[in-house]
Image: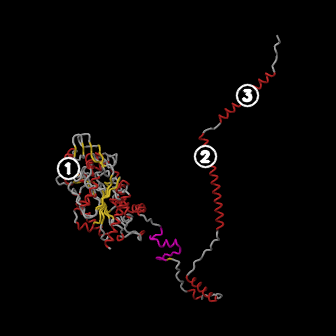
Amino acid sequence: MPKKFEGENSKVAVARARKEAAKQADQKKKEEKQEEEFWKDDDKHVQKKLQRKDEKEKKRVEQLEKKTALKNLADEEMEAIKAPPKQASSKISRLQIQAELEKREAAAKGKGSQTKVVPVEDMDAPIPENINRVVIDGEVASSVDEAIQVLRISDSAADIERHPEKRMKAAYAAFEERHLPRLREENPNMRLSQVKQMLHREWLKSPENPLNASHSQYNKKKCIAANDLQGHPVILVPGDGGSQIEGRLDKPTAVHYVCSKKTDYWFSLWLNMELLVPIVIDCWVDNMKLTYDNTTRKTTNNPGVEIRIPDFGNSTSVEWIDPSKASAGNYFATIAESILKFGYERNVSLRGAPYDFRKAPNELQDYFVNTKALVEDTYSRTNGQKIIFITHSMGSPMILYFLNHQTQEWKNKYIKSWISLAGCWAGTIKALKVYAQGDNLGVRVLSETALREQQRTSPSLSWLMPSDKLWTPEEVMVQTSGRNYTIRDYQDFFLDIDFPLGYDMWQDTHPLVHELTAPGVEIHCIFGTGVDTAERLVYSKSSPIGKATIIMGDGDGTVNVRSLAACSKWIKEQSQPVYVQAFPNRDHMAVLYDPVILDYIQRVVTASQEEEAVRKA
């Protein structure tokens, strides 16, 4: 047996070493790869962000280079076309011009070498007028800017704002500074807010108010006189809730400890947003509600409450029913502003006829006397131009009642036309809803039931009950679990809602315009349609009181379409033109602000004046 080899095989050792080295090399590569993977940033969002950053920087550099190149090119072009500056030319007088002409004439005759010497005595002669200067009322202008300054309309050198509403703030501040101390001295027991309210009422009537100023120095050459009026004078007549109401108190009791019993001044009662809040609303209801006497068939204010309708004849009281001119109080303001550009002047050719909207025509005889006088006064102030009525909602049947009580001769002389907006000619189902449920006037935090106490006492609400001229005895207007109510069931309806006086009021007001007698004047009857409007009230219980399920029909959201369009019957009943215009998707108040309807009104008032001028010619 051979002897076992002793020692290490060199070949094996080399192979082992090579294998170990390869293993270590592979291990090192793996470690390096792991290290590289660990530190590698492969976030796609970061990469995109970096890419966008690079692109943005590249674009910036390119734009900068392009801008620099364009600037250089522009500079080169300016240098190329740059002309030497002209020497300023001095002005010369007519004497110098004459001398130059003589010199040229002499040169033309061969005397150019001779120089004309002006004698010394001629130097004292008066210098002829320089026609390069403008002299007006002692002011001299020798440049364009100075000429504009001299020829300006105002007396002062400072600019005066031409737009009256833009001058309003500064004018009111000056008015307040002058008159507030006087009012505070005259009313030492009143709070500052109350004094300021009085001041604001004075401001509305003051000639210092830019909106009332009939003649102002700043626009004396641009004001259009009554003779230049581009439309017939207008009288605005509002609807239910469209007139300001002021109150004064001397009450024996108050319904709440927060309510005042006595005031030494008139304060705004409607529209006054400060009073339409919870708790305080109880004071407002007690001051606004009426008491009906079924013996005299008249209503009176609560004891100790005086009510007045301010500023009859002035359009401002119906343009804004909130004296503070909050947006919610905009009534006829948009219409007024849209026609003022045709030369209308407030309190001259643009008038207002507000009234106590709580009452129906049978209690407003003084109002109709005043309205007739207002028409005749406006006619006189505008040099015998016929007037145009613009009425809204309940104001339309109000003026229908007025016209039905005037002679045709009077109407022919004084009335040019009548624009009725959303006229409630024959009542509305909403009146039944107000009697049964109340109306929170769009203020969600107010109780409909609390307001219903005041709303029920207004005879004008009974006047707006649906008329049997348009609703048939077969039509159900109010439905309960026990019975239905139609046009013939008003007495039962008022008994079932526990307000029997409502039926007495309805009997008083029902005949006033029941027959819808034609007005005998040209009329434009405008209203909206296509808006969900109460058509029937449905109660799950036996009595028609409180919240009802309302079945909707067509109308303007307040008045049913059949009542809005009732004016169309006059087309065949009078010789004067009757224009009926329905505007889809306009609600009851939108007709006062809609641009299309405003344009229609403008065309009517201006076309009326043009036709009158042609007729007189």
Q: In the rendered view of the protein, which quadrant contains the N terminus?
A: top right
Q: Are marks 1 and 3 in contact (CB under 8 Å)?
A: no
Q: Does any portion of residue 87 appear in the rendered image?
A: yes
The quadrant holding residue 420 is bottom left
Q: Residue 160 at x, y = what percent?
A: 45, 66
Looking at the rendered structure, the secondary structure element under dot 1 is: helix
Amino acid type of the residue tagged 2 in the rendering:
Arg
Residue 82 left/right relative to 302: right
Looking at the rendered structure, the secondary structure element under dot 3 is: helix
Q: Which residue is rendered at x = 79% and y = 21% of the image?
A: 12
Measured in 3D between alpha carbons, the distance from the residue under mark 1 to the one under mark 3, in whole angstroms, is: 112 Å
**Foreground residue among 509 and 535:** 535
Amino acid type of the residue tagged 3 in the rendering:
Gln
Q: Residue 429 at x, y = what percent?
A: 26, 49
Q: Which residue is mark 1?
A: 503
Q: Which residue is mark 2?
A: 52
Q: Which residue is mark 3?
A: 24
Residue 407 left/right relative to 126: left
**Foreground residue among 599 and 414:** 599
Amino acid type of the residue tagged 1 in the rendering:
Tyr
Of mark 2 and mark 3, the one earlier in the sequence is 3
Q: Residue 423 at x, y = what percent?
A: 29, 56
Of mark 2 and mark 1, the one earlier in the sequence is 2
**Foreground residue among 89 and 585:** 585
Figure check: 210 above or below 111 = above
Quick check: is 35 in the magenta stretch? no
The part of the chain drawn in magenta is 135-158
